[in-house]
Image: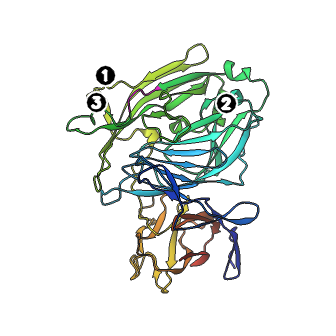
Amino acid sequence: MPKHSLRRIVTSGLTIWLLISMSIVGIATTGLTLVPSERSVQAAESDGNHRIYLPIVNTPFPDALGQGVVVVDSQTGGLVTTDSGASLEIPPGAVPLRDDGQVGEMTFNMQVVDRTPSLPSEFTPVGLVYQLGPEGFTFNTPVILNLPIPNDVDPASVLGFTYYDATSGEWQMVPATVDAENRIATVATTHFSPWGLFRFSRSDTTWRNTNGGRIRVRNPHRYESGVYPPPDGNLPYTVTYGVCVRSYTLADPQQSWAWTPPQNWTMTVNAYVHPLSWNYGQPRQADWWLPNGTYDLIEVWHFSEVNRSTGYVPRFASYWRPIGNTTVNAQNPQEFVYSEANLDLANFTAGRPPCFGRQDTSAGTGDVQITLNWNARVDLDLHVIDPNGERIYYANTRSRSGGQLDRDNLCWNMILGRPENIFWPSGEAPPGTYIIQVDYFSGCGGSEAVPFSVRAVIQGQVYTFTGVSRPGDRRVEVGRVEVR
């Protein structure tokens, strides 16, 4: 039997761990009421399983809302909330279009995981670690993660976020914006993985003031106003504005190794705030603490049309320009402000800024979506056997039951971190058991063992399976899920 480090669910005698998100999707209709859901959600927490039955939240605005899980498309925004006070805010236009250029859709979730970040001795992890999904995709514009600062932690000591980089196998550190009054830390990111907070290890909070400075970003654009930028814009828009770091020279060179490569330092503010977000109605500005140093900055803009007409494909575009070297310390705070009046796109570079990552597309989703993630240059294949016994995989990409394989990562055109995906559109998934398998097809010239995760979205519930695939592991079952 392969040595998969999987978690607790009984599947054909194999004991695995099952991580299930805690809720169902809330979709907008009219009024502000709580009504019984036609579907129930069975949830599992880290200590003891129990059932939770949650209502759908019907809201008077067109954006999605859910506790633990929410479905968002390319036209709308969304908010994932948790009992702990953590939240995930998805701006309109963040979800990429599909491969065919039509409106995409993604299921977002966040859940507490039992992970302890490994950080340099000067820094200490703070609070809970959250697994965010979907992994393996790059969003059009940064998504906003808000984590609560524990009551026994001084907000002044919180320096940033840490996330697990599966490619390097290390926990990376990035700056954060901290709202001391509301005890919330915030980061903007275009990719998902496990995320948590960290602080300076010593109790002397004056270290923060003497060893770093502030970058402030203000975005006064009113969401769903103005006109999408020329040459042919005619709809209102939302905009993400801010700065990113291309490179840096820290005043204390010994700190350089501790921080993540600066290309992931994204300090942006979106004009959008979900109406039920903790900071709705507040000025759209944020402050980031950065270690003392000289930073090569770029200024970034991402525009997205706001139009909720059924079937309309919103346009979006990114621009950026170099700012150059900027000194950041306590005596020299920096501020950057979005101004539509001074927006001359002819002076900017069109296209995604380096800190946003590659342009991506949405994968297929529906009643059933099963996604395989890994971060190594080997060819793993996802197989799913439907309730009728038909196998969907690279040699049979469409099943008679409606299942489709729309992502296949191969040795010859490998995109590191790009997932494989099999789905059944809404209303087409037959009831019964779906068997999930992972196949070590090729080492692409190597022979390494590869950690992987499989995320299964089944009728609004999210299941996560993890394991390690080794050469010779062919069509190994990692779990089963049910559609009723």
* Numbered disc 1: secondary structure: loop
Counting residues from the start of the chain, the first of labels 1 and 2 encountered is 2
Alpha carbon separation for disc pair 1 and 2 = 37 Å
Residue stretch in magenta? 218-222
Q: CA distance from mark 3 to mark 1?
A: 9 Å
Q: Residue 255: give its label.
A: 2
- Secondary structure beneath dot 3 equals helix
Q: Which residue is mark 1?
A: 342
Q: Is residue 313 above or below residue 10?
A: above
The amino acid type found where label 3 is placed reads: Leu
Query: Pointer 3: what residue?
Result: 345
Q: Nearer the viewer, residue 241 or 212?
A: 241
Q: Amino acid at mark 1?
A: Asn
- For the residue pair 427 and 480, the one nearer the viewer reads as 427
Quadrant of image for the N terminus: bottom right
Is residue 430 in view from this perspective? yes
Q: Is residue 221 magenta?
A: yes
Q: Is residue 135 magenta?
A: no
- Mark 3 touches mark 1? (CB < 8 Å): no
Q: How is the image coloured?
A: rainbow
In the image: residue 220, left or right of residue 57? left
Q: Pointer 2 and pointer 3: residues touching (CB < 8 Å)?
A: no
The amino acid type, in three-letter code, at marker 2 is Gln
Q: Position of residue 209 (x, y in %)?
A: 67, 19
Q: Residue at x 57, y 26 (%)?
A: 249
Q: Are marks 1 and 2 in contact (CB under 8 Å)?
A: no
Q: Confirm whether residue 134 shows in the render.
A: no
Q: Could you classify mark 3 by the number of other residues whose Cα lies within 10 Å: few (under 14), some (14-19), or many (20 or more)?
A: some
Residue drawn at (47%, 58%) of the image: 418
Residue 8 appears left or right of 352: right
